[in-house]
Amino acid sequence: MRQPQPWVNEANVALVTDLYELTMLQAYWHERMQGRAVFSLFFRRLPARRNYMVACGTGDVLDYLETLHFSSESLDYLAGLGRFSHDFLRWLADFRFTGDVHSVPEGTPVFPNEPLLQVEAPIAQAQLVESYLMNQVHLQTVLASKASRVITAARGRPVVDFGLRRMHGSDAGVRGVRAYYVAGLAATSNVLAGQIYGMPVTGTMAHSYIQAHEDELHAFRAFTELYPDTTLLVDTYDTLEGVRRVIRLKEELGEAFRVSAIRLDSGDLAQLAAESRELLDAAGLTDVQIVVSGGLSEEKVAEILDRGAPVDGFGVGTHMGVSEDEPTLDLAYKLTEYEGVGRLKRSPGKATLPGRKQIFRIEQHGRALRDVIGRHDEEHPGRPLLRTVMRQGRRTPEGEASLDAARELAADERGRLPDRILALPAAAKPYPVEISSALQAYTDQTLRRLEAAEAPDP
């Protein structure tokens, strides 16, 4: 019998969940618990090398919620596990998400304990989606945040994604590009992601193409005959000799020479860029740009520019594609309200705040000063960040925001951050996040109620 293919699609995505979500669903169903719940998705602390995170992934979450259902094949598989009753599986056959989602816009800088999104729905619906929501928001927020740092380091020069081959699977390779696009990357080498997200694709040659020819100049000559305005990779054998061969090609072709750039991929990139620029300029090739790649991180990009290297663009791969220095985020999805009553955890290091919330960003002269987490219905100074992006299982106009809009918002919001937060090193003074007096009072009230309920009988 042919095995199912290991690809996630609309027919099987409902099973992209942890088993305990389904066992809890059956328990809710069995107990007839159908009350409305609020779950909050947030992270508890910043990674050590991050001053902020860039919220991303909500668009894919909304796609999932709008189409979520259990196919007959998925239900047959669950029946075969022997854990679920026939009546419960019949109930699952009609399962749809009918709740509301409140989210910060994609591209927004966010900080610890702030809800990136809140799900408000019948408890079984809000519970089931936990694993998928965390998976998508975690991946894209981690990668958008890393890409945002690389873009900051590049100081206005274009950054291109070269990371597909070492990313953690094809799904991450595609959805990661979505996050890069929101963060502001100029282009990607990933052709499928370019098709899906309308992002420019770029790429020319690998070292193997050069090696497959008898000599480097022959390879350059053949490639530019087919692609006249290409970027030539010059470091296969000897970088500066490679640049001289580009100059010789110009002498051969004369006015027909249209090579747009050279790419340096190894060695002391700052020094080689400076020496390459001298050679090109002396030959009159002032319009030929220099692009560098090869093991670049945001710190390496900043170092290259700090040394005054005449670099026009950067190709960044593995360091960004797997967020090598900080690949994880302490993301959590927690129940904060059920049937109108606040819920919280008191666990050490994992305490939560009750109820549905709002984030108020306090700004002065266009720069962010601090955030205040408050109750969703309270009045408070500052710009409210959370918006209703889904109502009764369908996107609202706010939920229809395009990737281009998210990209523009991310650039604008990055420009509002304090310099110490936008900088690459860890800020000596973190960005302040406060709890409103109304939310603190509600938290104290919820704690007192919980303590009274948990008190031993006299």
Image (cartoon, helix red, strand yellow):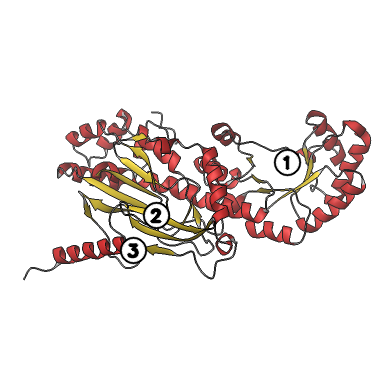
Q: Amino acid at mark 2?
A: Ile
Going from N to C along the chain, the mark reached first, 2 or 1, is 1
Q: Residues within 10 Å of mark 3 (few under 14, many from 20)?
A: few
Q: Position of residue 437 (x, y in %)?
A: 31, 64
Q: Nearer the viewer, residue 344 or 25?
A: 344
Location of residue 394 by image quarter: top left
Which disc is residue 206 wearing?
A: 1
Which disc is residue 350 wearing?
A: 3
Q: Which residue is mark 2?
A: 359
Going from N to C along the chain, the mark reached first, 3 or 2, is 3
Q: Secondary structure at mark 1?
A: loop
Q: Position of residue 186 (x, y in %)?
A: 64, 42
Q: Nearer the viewer, residue 402 or 344?
A: 402
- How far, Cα to Cα, is label 2 from label 1? 47 Å
Q: Is residue 443 left or right of residue 152?
A: left
Q: Residues within 10 Å of mark 1 (few under 14, many from 20)?
A: few
Q: Amino acid at mark 3?
A: Lys
Q: Amino acid at mark 1?
A: Ala
- How far, Cα to Cα, is label 3 from label 1? 48 Å
Give the number of the mark in front: 2 or 1.
2
Q: Secondary structure at mark 3?
A: loop
Going from N to C along the chain, the mark reached first, 3 or 1, is 1
Q: Position of residue 245 (x, y in %)?
A: 88, 43
Location of residue 4 by image quarter: top left
Q: Residue at x 45, y 50 (%)?
A: 138
Q: Residue at x 19, y 63 (%)?
A: 450
